[in-house]
Amino acid sequence: QLQLVESGGGAVETGGSLTLSCVVSEYIPRTYWVYWVRQAPGKERKEREGVAFMHLDGTTSRYAESVEGRVTISLDKSKNTLYLHMNNLKADDTGTYYCAADPRGGYGLLSAPEFLERWGQGTLVTVSS
C-alpha cells in the first residue's frame, strides 16, 4: 500500500510556477519528517537531490540552498497533504520529484536523501524554454 502519493507534475516554461502535492498516509507516524527530493534525468538514485523538508506537525521547514527563495513547502493537515510550491522555474529544476518520509529531520538527510526511509513513486516536472 502506497504511503506517499505525489501528483501535480507536468510541463512548464522557464520562469513559470508549479505546485506539487503529496498525500501522506495515516500509516506514516505524525512524528515523522517529510522531504521533497528530486532526481534529474540521467542521474542515478544515489544522485537524488534534497529540495526541502518539514516536520509533520507543520512547525519546522528547511530548504536546500539551490532552491531557497523560489520554493515553499507547506502542509494541509486537514487533507494530510504536503505541498511544494515552485516559482521562477529553471531548466535545472527538471526531474522526477519524490516525497519521502523519515523519523529523522535535518540537513544531513537533505544532503544524502538516499538514506530516507519511505518513498513515493514520484511525479515528473519538465521545465523548458
Image (cartoon, grey):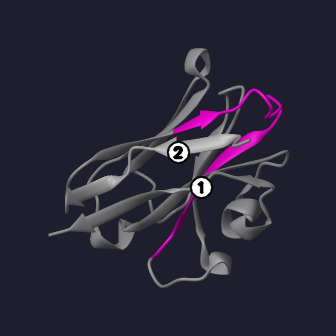
The segment highlighted magenta reads: 22-40
Query: Extreme top residue here?
Result: 78
Relative placement, left or right, of 106 versus 83 is right
- Nearer to us in this view, 39 or 3: 3
Q: Against 105, is 3 above or below?
A: above
Quarter of the picture containing the N terminus is: top right
Q: Against 6, is 117 above or below?
A: below
- Nearer to us in this view, 55 or 83: 83
Q: Against 50, is 81 above or below?
A: above
Q: Position of residue 86 (x, y in %)?
A: 36, 48
Question: Magenta span has 23?
Answer: yes
Label 2 crowd bin: few (<14), some (14–19), many (20+), radius 10 Å = many
Question: Magenta span has 27?
Answer: yes
Residue type pointed to by label 2: Glu
Relative placement, left or right, of 36 versus 92 is right
User: On the image, numbered disc 1 is attached to which residue?
Assistant: 121
Query: Extreme front residue here?
Result: 1
Which element type, helix, strand or loop, lies under badge 1? loop
Real-space Cα distance between discs 1 and 2? 7 Å
Marks 1 & 2, CB-CB < 8 Å contact? yes
User: On the image, numbered disc 2 is attached to which residue?
Assistant: 6
